Every structure is written in structure tokens, then in C-alpha cells.
Image (tube, grey):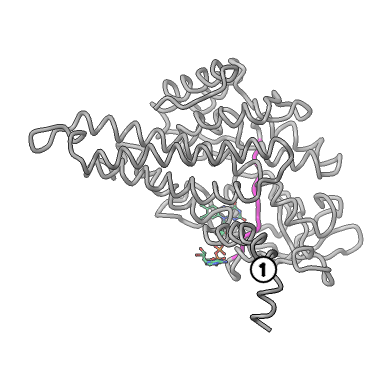
Amino acid sequence: MELPVPDHVRPLRDQFRAFVDERINPVEHLLYTWWEPGDPGGPIMADLRAQAKAEGLWAIGHPTEVGGQGLPFLDYVYINEVVGRSEPAVWVFGQGTLQDSIMLNTYASQEWRDKYLGPLVNGDIIQSFGMTEPAVASSDATQLQTTAYVDGDEWVINGRKWFTSLARFSKYTTVIARTEERAERPHLAFSAIIVPTDTPGYNIVRSVPVFGDNEGDHCEVEYDNIRVPYTNLLGERGQGFMLGQKRLGAGRIFHAMRFLGRAQRCYDYLCERAVRRVAFGSPLADKQLIQQMVFETAAEIMACRGVALDAAAQLDTGDPARVEIGMIKVLTARMFHNAVDRAIQVYGGKGVTSDLPLERYYKEARLGRIWDGPDETHIATVSRLLLKPYRDAHAAELDAATS
Ligand SMILES: Cc1cc2nc3c(=O)[nH]c(=O)nc-3n(C[C@H](O)[C@H](O)[C@H](O)COP(=O)(O)OP(=O)(O)OC[C@H]3O[C@@H](n4cnc5c(N)ncnc54)[C@H](O)[C@@H]3O)c2cc1C
């Protein structure tokens, strides 16, 4: 499938694609295990990162003021599509810290910017984000129970989070905690606070296994009377959710493009297998049931790509593109899930073995329907926005009917 890409992005995109396909994909199965803080994959990863830096492919999307290369947003969107062809590529190219670097640069005190920004962009440290809690439905984040109160010039934090991904390897966690007792609205009761992971009372209870492995290092963390300086607050008090949403906005587009990249790799696997495997006297590609899989996968990729690029273009004009971003969060995870499912199917038994990346993708695609908020919450929000003009137009009628 030849997908349209602006001419001026093509050479850089081709460079990334060749790097991913020729140098990362052959060793990607060796790059999934985090070795130690700041080292996402041991010596092979270190070597690939050195190559990426030497070839000018490092941190290309990070703004120049934080030490990145400042590639324009829309160009970077297209690069993410080919980077997404391999799961660990995001760490090879220093892209995993983009959203948090921007958040730190925009909202943190000078002290924390000086301390963390350089190492974050350079790939020497990583960060984590602690919002979800085991005790409450965290998709309704106004229920979060972790609290932070001010004592002198410090915050005192108590609570329990889980699914704080990569916490064990992080230098700090941005924690969302209830700080306001009398907020005007429930969403304004929470703040974002930087907590260095070596703070006494930051206790990692366990790395929660997901689909039988610990690679994502989704940690359960107890905050036991943690004390951090008041200046660890990001932005203003009560802005925690707003910051969290800002962190996710553009990130959801990059993520959608990377899922598109993975789905396109699944599509390559599907088609290659279909033309090469012979059963009942002809290649699988001659069977209509298999042709339908090829058709559905290609069509879903094209459709999702259209919505994702449209959302990116809108975001680039300053429009928050809430409808489109909510849609791509749901659609790309579904599309990726379908693509990998079909690719697995045409490979038969081999499809579910670790000889192919498909079994990993299958797990990832499933998780993508839950993380950053489950499908249902995005569907509810998008539907509310879509229905609003119709509700407004018929408000009087509705009032009369329901009063
Ligand atoms: C791999 C992975 C990595 C993650 N990484 C992080 C991380 O780094 N930091 C972090 O803070 N969190 C992280 N999360 C947590 C994730 O964001 C939450 O799991 C998610 O927001 C849902 O919250 P919950 O698990 O409490 O589910 P709940 O809120 O209990 O929801 C359970 C289910 O209820 C249903 N539901 C909820 N709302 C509605 C509705 N309005 N209408 C209909 N049905 C509804 C949905 O089916 C939903 O799946 C991660 C999760 C996964 C799986």
C-alpha cells in the first residue's frame, strides 16, 4: 500500500523506515527488557541509540528549547507512522520522553527544569505518570483517593496507585493527587506533583504482571507520608487534570500513528503469508475468505489514517480536535486489534508463537483499548459532543417532554 506522504517529509521518513526495518526489526525481540534505570534494552539498544544520534535521528520532535530538533508537528506525525513499525523504536530514537519533557518545560519550576530536562531529552533518565488507583474506577478520575496536603513548605502525599508504567526505572513520577477540599467543580480538586522515586515513603509494592509478563513494569506504588517541596507542584493547584489532558492530546496522535505503523506491518505479514502459503491446491491469497481479510485490513488502515491526519491538521491550527482525538483513540486500537488478529489467523499455529512479533502485538492492541482511558469513556465524550448541537436545537422541546 503506497500511502500519501508530503514530498518534503519523504526523505527523512524513508531514512527512519530503513533504520527501523533493517536495523531494529531484526533484533527487536532482544530489546523488550529494561535493564536498569535509563537503559531500555542493554548493549544492543545502546548501540542503536548511538547510531540514531550520530545520524541525526535523535529527539527530532522535541522542541529546540529543550534540546530536541524541533521538527514541525505535522512532519513529526508522519515520522511516527514508520517508527511505529517496531515497538522499541520509540526508545531507540529518544521519542519516549516527548510529552513529559514538554510538560516539565511548560509547568515545572526552574529547579526541576534544570535538574531533569537535559537528562530526559538525552535519554539518560525516564519518567512515569501516576494517576490510576486500584481502589476506585479511575476512568472516572474524580474518584481518585490519593491526597496531598501542605505542611510548611512541603506537600505530604498519601495513597496507593497502580499501573504506574516503568515506575521502577523512573527518576520521578508525576502524581495526580487530591489537593483541594473545596473545589468549584470536582475536576478542579486535583494537582500534579513531581515525586522523585527515591523519596522516602515511595514504596514499589510490586510490578503487576500483565498477560503473564512484567516487561511493561506496571507498578503498584504506595505513597506513605511522602514529603516533597511545595515547588514540586506542576502548574497551578487544581490544574492536575488539565495538565494530564494536555500531556495526552498531541500524544494520542503520535500514538495513533504508531499503531498505524504496527498495523501496516501486520498487513505486510498478512499479505506475504497469503501469497506464499499453499493450501488445498492454491495460495491462500486465492481464497475469498482471505481476500476479505486483506480488504478489511487495508480499508481500516486507510480510514483510520484519514481521521488521525485530520485530527493532527486541526490540532496544528490550535483547535483541540476533541472529537477526532477521541475517535482515533478508539478507532486505531480497534483497527490494530483487527489487523493483528487477521495476521495471526493466516499464520495458523506459527501466528501465536514468539517466532513472530504478532503475539506481542496482539497483547498490546488489547491493552490499547484500556490505557489512557477505556474505549467507553471516549465514546461517551465524543457522542456527547456530537449530540450537543442537536440537543441545544431541541432544548425547549426536550424540557417540555421531561418536565
Ligand atoms: C498497559 C497499561 C498501561 C497503563 N499505564 C498507566 C500509567 O502509566 N499511568 C496511569 O496512571 N495509568 C496507567 N494505566 C491505567 C489505565 O489508564 C486505566 O486502567 C484506565 O484509565 C481505566 O481505569 P480502571 O482500570 O480503573 O478501570 P475502571 O475505571 O474501573 O473501568 C472499568 C471498565 O468500566 C467500563 N466503563 C468505565 N466508564 C464507562 C462509561 N462511562 N460508560 C460505559 N462503561 C464504562 C469500561 O468497560 C472500563 O474498561 C495503564 C493501563 C494499562 C492496561
Please state the horizontal and vertical placement of residue 68, each as a whole percent of the image.
70, 26
Question: For this view, does 32 lie left or right of residue 68?
Answer: left
Quarter placement of the N terminus: top left
Number of residue marks: 1
Q: Residues within 10 Å of mark 1 (few under 14, many from 20)?
A: few
User: In the displayed structure, would residue 74 be above or below residue 338?
Assistant: above
Magenta part of the chain: 125-133
Quarter placement of the C terminus: bottom right
User: In the displayed structure, would residue 256 be above or below residue 206?
Assistant: above
Give the residue at x 62% y 26%: 75
Give the residue at x 58% y 47%: 166
Q: Secondary structure at mark 1?
A: loop
User: In the displayed structure, would residue 319 be above or below residue 273?
Assistant: below
Question: For this view, does 326 lie left or right of residue 295?
Answer: right
Depth check: 309 or 224 in front? 309
Which residue is disc 1 drawn over? 394
Depth check: 314 or 120 in front? 314
